[in-house]
Image (cartoon, rainbow, N blue to C red):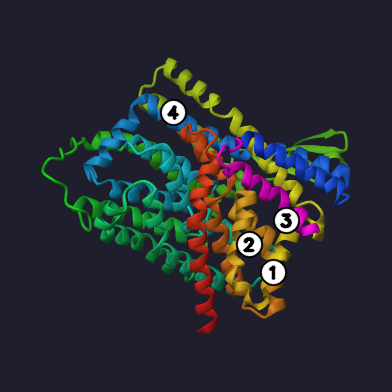
Amino acid sequence: MNTILSALPILLLIWAMTKRNAVPSHIALPAVAVLVAFIQLVFFQANAGLLRANVIAGALSVLTPISIVAGAILLNRVMFFSGAEVLLSQWLKGISANKVAQLMIIGWAFAFMIEGASGFGTPAAIAAPILIGLGFPAIPVAIFTLIMNTVPVSFGAVGTPIWFGLSGLSLSEMQLMDIARQTALLNSLAAFIVPFIALSFVVTWDAIRQNTLFILLSILSCTVPYVVFAQWNYEFPSLIGGAVGLGLSILLAKQGIGLKKTTDTELPAKVMEAKTIMKVFLPFVLLIAILAVSRIPQLGVKALLNDMTPWLIWRLGDADFEVSRALVFSINNILGMNVNWQYKSLYVPAVIPFLIVSLVCIPLFSVSKGLVVAALRNTGQRLFLPMLSLIGALVMVNLMMQGGSQAPMLLLAQAFSGLLGDSWGYAAALLGALGSFFSGSATVSNLTFGGIQLGIAEKVGLPVSLVLALQSAGAAMGNMVCINNIIAVSTILGVSNKEGFIIKRTIIPLFVYALVAALFSIVSLNL
């Protein structure tokens, strides 16, 4: 009964958001959060004070995703009003007028590199508006970028899902490296299928077939260095793979290698001056440079931006409000409960780099005061309803995780494992995806379910490194159905009330990815 009650809110949410007359997410998510609270109080006899504290923490947690989305929208709007998006589109068309080439360069290789540097859903936030500027339709682009932003996620934000997400499991360095190697190999095998499915939402299968060689070469240009680098490092595979892949994909497209030959009736794009190209790309170069510098631990900037040394402390009833030297805002022991909230204002990629780069763009592209005001107004108008949706989602997640060993989310995980026993490897990746679906983060999925996966592996006699690699890959593939990510990219593109529609489309490649993971498990166990 407890398992059924745990699953009920999720099933209702999926039904409400995917039925014919779908309930908008800003209504469905808060309503389901209320239902979870009711079930926790009435059936699970949850501590009411702890429940209220988790509601407050969940509502405050919206600041992280909504500030990132706000920064991404502001940069996009400034570039749009400045005319830089038009110039960028002209440059890409100058490389190749082929739609498949444009999609693979921006939606695959460029996003791959951004994920390696930043994570936090930044790749879709940056890539999707560029593709819209090239003339692609908004909803297909949203689906495309969500599906594409999966393979590099296991090593996103300089490997955070691995080195931090699995940090509580007392694994040796050798075990972490083995997990990284298997994760990279599994994700790379899925990469031979997933991008083709993603492309099918934007272009025809005929176009995909005619450009198959280029697609494969672009995939390999990212995944080969990705797998090679993962043999001895779990921080930089996605960053290096994306950087190499982007350069090679542009070179291949320029030479027309693997692309369908253009017809004589197509007009060549106007050749842009090198100075103009450099100017248009300066914001993106700054973005990548700032993200890389702020995420690579060896440079020391990451530690400075995460410095938790207290600067100011206030007592708020039973809670403590702290501001650290790095402007990390924290509330500890909310309502006197062991529930905390934190916002890393300088590390979350909102102020650094999005706001900074947006401010640089104003004089760079001579954006008038009136257009800056228009960009700010446009950004604000897009945020209200998504903020309600995200508050509902984050409160729901917090409540689903309340209850220790009887938390609804953990009961669902145990139900999964109990059904399969030593065949758990077939479905381990789906548990990782469930974590991302709830939390919007591969790192949080690994933190939440890594211990459960480890326990199941030891209990049923499966290799620990294999099961945790399946968890890591599953957490990455869950990005494409994650409600937070869907709301974020839809907001950036100005798409309303299409979350359910998008989930129904992205669930198909999710199960294809899961099938690849299951086959990988079978082969690995029989080698």
C-alpha distance separating marks 2 and 3: 10 Å
Q: Is residue 195 left or right of residue 319?
A: left
C-alpha distance separating marks 1 and 2: 9 Å
Residue in view at x 42 percent, y 52 percent: 113
Residue 305 pos. (x, y %): 60, 44
Q: Is residue 83 above or below residue 499?
A: above
Q: Earlier in the sequence, mark 1 or mark 2?
A: 1
Q: Earlier in the sequence, mark 4 or mark 1?
A: 4
Q: Is residue 20 magenta?
A: yes
Amino acid type of disc 4? Arg
Which residue is under mark 4?
Answer: 77
Q: Earlier in the sequence, mark 2 or mark 3?
A: 3
Q: Is residue 522 above or below residue 472?
A: below
Residue in view at x 64 percent, y 56 percent: 435
Task: State the SS at label 1.
Answer: helix
Q: Please state which of residues 194 and 420 is positioned toward the viewer in this rendering.
A: 420
Mark 4, other Cα within 10 Å: few <14 / some 14–19 / many ≥20: many
Magenta stretch: give its range: 1-24
Q: Is residue 158 left or right of residue 62?
A: left
Amino acid type of disc 1? Ser
Amino acid type of disc 3? Met
